[in-house]
Image (spheres, helix red, strand yellow):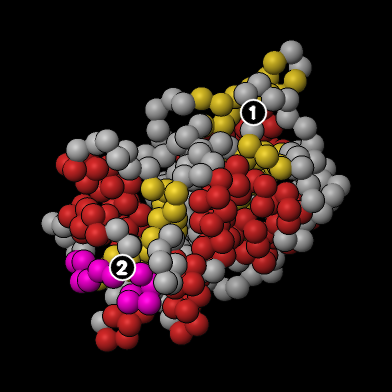
Amino acid sequence: MKILIVDDSVVFRSTIKLALSGIPDIEVTGTASNGKFALAKLETNPVDLIILDYEMPEMNGLETLRELRKKDQQTRVIVFSSQTMSGAEKALEALRNGADDVLPKTVNSGSSSESITEQIRADLLPKVLQFLAKGTFQPKPTRIEPLLSSLPGSVQKEKFSQNSLVYFKPEIILIGSSTGGPNALEVIFKELRMPVRCPILIVQHMPPVFTQCLAERLQEITKISAGEAKQMEVLRPGQIYMAPGDYHMTLFRDQGQIKLRLDQGPQRNSVRPAVDPLFETASEIYGNKCMGFILTGMGEDGVVGATAVKRCGGGIMIQNEASCVVYGMPGSVFEAGAYDAIGDLQQIGAALKRFCA
């Protein structure tokens, strides 16, 4: 994988390059101090991935993205943005304009150069490697079925009966997503409006502040009350709850009420928040009235949770590979056979709207 680093800070350019050095199949082929220089370099030296700073002089990250996407839809782009509300809003704007993933700049200026390099490597490397891994899961070709029909899976580790979701009436909606998730969520929520008959809970792999900004964006789109979940909050129909960055979100019963619990327990699947804890606890409470969606994202987060939902007789729908930025999460559920239906974002959006009506 050939990589171009675009940042106005020479120190940051050098540190990112050092952080990625020595990684098999990864080669930093160039650097640029702003978007204008980057686009000029790409004319003669195309790359597979661009690591792009948002705040730059002359041509910033957003302007660069817009120009790049006018003629290049294939090159992957990871955008660095500050971990502030303004930075989070800019990050979501970058995703809407063609970025594949975003990463907050959380480097402590008081740290040593070695620790800064290690921190950037720990944060950035998984984001880079997810694009190398794209295509790991290749579902067997299958005949296109009508919306919400069951599709045959590959060899299954556990045999699950597949539900017909046509007349399914869930009491709770669960959604898990990672890379590509913010855009996917905007698409599937686009047609959703009040009243909504059941609560909707979302785990999106994003850092603090970014999740708050995303929840506000979904409320803006749907006009449905949406926000980050709060500790001990009573679950209500007709609301959208977003797991806050760096907190797992789970459900529990308390004196006849179903409440939200937030915790900073160990990461699961190398992430916090993770999808699995939510799906597992929801399945224990709602059983066969639980409906889960696993959308685009890296890794295997969600497969254990989807399996728990299926064991209780609930429903699972996964995003198809063609519409995913990264097929890791839905691909893992596909491989496990823990799903009832597969669809693109428009089909998932139609299903969500029908389940909530």
Image quarter in which the N terminus is found: bottom left
Q: Is residue 45 above or below residue 334?
A: below
Residue 297 appears anywhere in the view: no
Real-space CA distance between mark 2 and mark 1, rounded to the nearest whole angstrom = 41 Å
Residue at the outermost top position: 255
Q: Residues within 10 Å of mark 1 (few under 14, many from 20)?
A: some
Q: Quadrant of residue 76?
A: bottom left
Give the residue displayed 68% in from the left and 39% down from the top.
227
Q: Residues within 10 Å of mark 2 (few under 14, many from 20)?
A: many
Q: Position of residue 152 (x, y in %)?
A: 54, 61
x%, y% of residue 21? 16, 57
Of the pair 216 and 140, the residue shown nearer to us:
216
**Kind of element beneath mark 1:** loop
Tell me the magenta residue range.
27-38
Say whether residue 28 is magenta. yes
Vertical comparison of 271 with 77: above or below? above
Between residue 299 and residue 109, name the one nearer to us: 109
Question: Which one is in front in this view, the residue at disc 2 or the one at disc 1?
Answer: 2
Specify whether residue 115 is in view: yes
Instruction: Name the residue carrying label 2.
Output: 33
User: Which residue is farthest front?
Assistant: 57
Residue 321 counted in the magenta span: no
Badge 2 or badge 1: first in the primary sequence: 2
Q: Which mark is residue 230?
A: 1
Q: Position of residue 293 (x, y in %)?
A: 60, 50
Q: Is residue 345 left or right of residue 35?
A: right
Query: Which residue is depicted at the point 24% across and 59% down?
Result: 10
Residue 85, compared with residue 27, is above or below; it is above
Which of the 4 quarters of the picture holds residue 257?
top right
Query: In this image, 255 relative to 145: left or right?
Result: right
> Could you tell me residue 134's position as x and y percent?
37, 64
Front residue of 288 and 220: 220
